Image: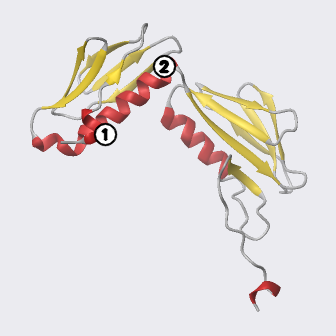
Amino acid sequence: MSRIGKKPIPLPAGVKYTISGNTVLVEGPKGKVSALIAPGIQLETVDGVLNVTRESDKAAAFHGLTRALVFNAVHGVTAGWTKDLDIVGIGYRAELKSKAMVVFTLGYSHPIEFPLPTGIEVTIDPKQTHLTISGIDRQKVGQVAADMRSLRKPDPYKNKGVRYTGEKLKKKAGKSGSK
């Protein structure tokens, strides 16, 4: 039995879900998110708690996955998801051009305009080196953060670039440090 699949999902007040085919639509105070349900998996509400069960052991591989996807949707419509990025380097910065566009200056010969998908919000601190990406869809928030990080990945020699807040980097020694 899946350990993650057995854990119940608490349904806060104001959260409703509807199942249609192989998708579940979760509605809450922040919006609507849909998640996929694998065949052979059922959702049941008991005492304000959502339980994920499977019909047989053939659906065992998707039991925990389906529970995690539904939990991410429920958490997204109630509290939302955030990712934090730090920009490290002299002259490296980001600024919000409009609600749907972030402009990065990352040491290239040109500024990089990054369009934001719908449902994603970005806030930038006054120093222009810390970004907070937020939204209700966990997968979309993580993908946008990964795309922003890939614009200038942290350099292993100087540790400059865009990194996740709290990310530990190993600094490599240069040519002179190899003796």
The type of residue carrying mark 1 is: Leu
- Identify the mark nearer the N-term, 2 or 1: 1
Asked whether, in this view, residue 94 is left or right of residue 154, the answer is: right
- Identified at 67% across, 39% down, the residue is 84
Task: Name the quarter where the C terminus is drawn.
Answer: bottom right
Q: Residue furthest left?
A: 56
Vertically, is 157 above or below 129? Answer: below
What distance separates the C-alpha of mark 2 from that of mark 1? 19 Å
Residue 87 numbered mark, or none: none
- How far across and down, in percent of the image, does residue 122 sit? 70, 30
Q: Where on the picture, by quarter, is residue 160?
A: bottom right
Marks 2/1 in contact by CB < 8 Å: the verdict is no
- Identified at 42% across, 26% down, the residue is 73
Vertically, is 76 above or below 17? Answer: below
Q: Is the image coloured rainbow, by chain, by secondary structure, or in one colour?
A: secondary structure
Vertically, is 89 above or below 73? Answer: below
Look at the numbered disc 2 and give the secondary structure of its residue: helix
The type of residue carrying mark 2 is: Val
- How far across and down, in percent of the image, does residue 111 sit? 83, 47
Query: Total of numbered circles in the picture?
Result: 2
Q: Callout 2 environment at 10 Å: few (<14), some (14 to 19), or many (20+)?
A: many
Q: Where on the picture, by quarter, is residue 41?
A: top left
List the residue tagged with mark 2: 77
List the residue tagged with mark 1: 65
Look at the numbered disc 1 and give the secondary structure of its residue: helix
Asked whether, in this view, residue 132 is left or right of residue 137, the answer is: right
- How far across and down, in percent of the image, does residue 139 sit? 49, 37
Q: Residue furthest bottom?
A: 179
